Image (cartoon, rainbow, N blue to C red):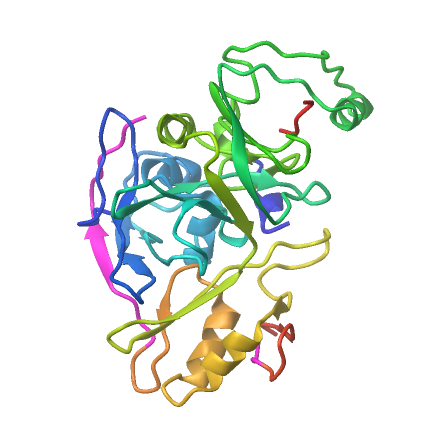
Amino acid sequence: MKRASLITLSLLGSLSASHGVWAVDYTLPAPGSRLIGQNQIYTVPADGKNLESIAQRFDTGILLLLEANNTVDPLLPMPGSELTIPSQMLLPDTPREGIVINLAELRLYYYPPGKNIVQVFPIGIGQQGRETPVMSTRIIQKIPNPTWTPTANIRARSLAQGIKLPAVIPAGPNNPLGRYALRLEQGGGEYLIHGTNARSSVGLRASSGCMRMRAADIQTLFAQAAWGTRVQIVNEPIKFSVEPDGRRYVEVHQPLSRNDWEDPQTVPIAVTARFVQFSEETGSDYNGINSAIVRRAGYPVQVNATASPSTPVMPVQSVRSNVAPVSQASGTLVSASSPVLQ
């Protein structure tokens, strides 16, 4: 399930940190552009810290780091090795309003009203068999210090594992919902965007359908997102863009696997008619696009017919820290060779 079996477990000119929390703010690109940020190169120090701690340091997800660095040890990267921090991305092809979640990249985008920025956060989402659904909805409740009322199904699954959950878990450090929760309207209110007491699960498929955020991130989002804020959840493993200056980009993520035996690095990806058209246009490097689909690096790759598919990176030694082939048809697969959930 998108490498979750491996672990259970910029800086950018457009980035800023404020109010004692690590908020990742990107200036919105010009009209017609979707490209934001710039990748970074981070040299791993000899401090014995694992990959998940590096993901927290850069407020990114561990699966995103594994996509970008597919030869790195998923538990303990070697000191002196260089990691690509995937802090460049294409905005999802959605209205730039409210909250947008792309399940395939395990990221949440928030567009603060009246500001020319987008904030980007890693999230944990529903595990296999308890997937977070695609939906368009809105926030109907903001809950500080939430209690957790496990659903009957969750209690039954836990009991089968020898764990007897109480009917209600009170607010506090052991609460799986953390300190803040945003309730969504669709699904009878059972889906939340919330904090977690299992911070290593952020950036993984680990929940029962809700969306988990790190403590500082949910605090930042909770303080800004109002009741009624629009929330759109999509599942787009392939994003693409023709920038105003003519540069063409493809960003490919490993798709969410549907069963235990699927390999997200090689499982076919469904593509749209628009993407097929983009791939076949004169300005696109058809082979470069197919290479990006095979690699699935999780960051934008330039695919102009005459351009190198490299992407700029920024070297980083220290950071601030506060807390396969495309086919012709739409939908065709391409391959590489109330009680709430929690």
Q: Nearer the viewer, residue 176 or 168?
A: 168
Q: Residue at x 65, y 55 (%)?
A: 257
Q: Quadrant of residue 158?
A: top right
| Magenta segment main secondary structure | loop
Q: Nearer the viewer, residue 227 or 265?
A: 227
Judge left or right: residue 313 versus residue 135. Answer: left
Please say whether residue 320 is one of the residues in the magenta stretch.
Answer: yes
Q: Nearer the viewer, residue 157 or 143?
A: 143
Percent coordinates x, y for residue 51 in the rendering? 42, 41
Q: Residue at x 64, y 30 (%)?
A: 189
Start and end of the magenta stretch?
A: 309-326
Kindly tell me whether residue 69 is visible in this rendering: no
Q: Residue at x 70, y 40 (%)?
A: 130
Judge left or right: residue 70 versus residue 330. Answer: left
In the rendered image of this protein, does residue 226 appear above or below residue 233? above
Q: Quadrant of the C terminus?
A: top right
In the rendered image of this protein, does residue 87 appear above or below residue 157? below
